[in-house]
Amino acid sequence: MSSTNVSGTGRRIARGVAAALLACIAAYDVVIGAQMLWSAEPWRMAGDDTLWAGLGALEGDLSAAVEAAMRRIGAFSLLAGLFQLGWIALSWRDRRFLTALLALQLAIGPVFYWIDQTWFQNTAYLSLKSFMGAAWVVALVLHAASWRES
């Protein structure tokens, strides 16, 4: 086996691991989105130690508005996760799709990071999101490495 074949195999493995990491993150979005849509208390999906956990104590129209907003966030999360899973599936045939997805996430990710840092400081949810962010960076590096020498 020549070094070119080994290098090509390594690139395919790197690309596959990158796609798998991104698919896990997207699957999380699908699950959390579905839970927020159909849960009796969607504001608890990020945990009991978050700012949102107390929203269930609201009453009247404000309570209904908060519940509707949380369900819309859930619908958005579900849609975003399904979209990403579909996009990742397309990337098996053409790695430029994964590059485009990573570029989009790189453009939007800092906004989500800022929101998470602002509203979920010192919570288990922020720890999970930080871990997912680190996994995303690993996926980015692996995907970039898969483009080298090709």
Image (cartoon, rainbow, N blue to C red):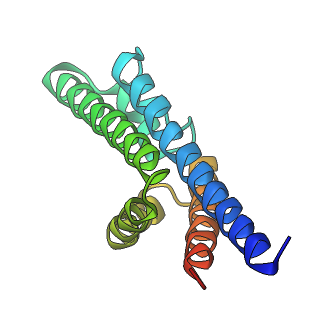
Nearer to me, 147 or 113: 147
Residue 71 against residue 14 in the figure, above or below: above
Q: Quadrant of the N terminus?
A: bottom right
The residue at 48%/44% (across/down) is 26
Q: Position of residue 8 (x, y in %)?
A: 69, 70
Residue 66 image offset from top left, x and y in percent: 24, 31
Q: Which residue lies furthest to the front in this view?
A: 1
Q: How far across and how far down the image is residue 62, in percent?
A: 18, 29
Task: Judge whether 114 appears above or below 124 on screen.
Answer: below
Seen from the viewer's position, the closer of residues 60 and 136 is 136
Residue closest to the far bottom: 149
**The C terminus, quarter of image:** bottom right
Q: Which residue is drawn at 21% across and 27% down?
A: 68
Residue for point 41% across, 21% down: 41
Tell which of 120 and 147 is nearer to you. 147
Q: What is the number of callouts on the image?
A: 0
Residue at the image point whose x is 50% and y is 45% from the top: 50
Q: In which quarter of the image is residue 108?
A: bottom left
Residue that protrudes farthest toward the right in the picture = 1
Q: Is residue 133 left or right of residue 103?
A: right
Does residue 95 appear to the left or right of 20 in the view shown? left
Q: Can residue 111 be seen in this view?
A: yes
Q: Can residue 122 be seen in this view?
A: no
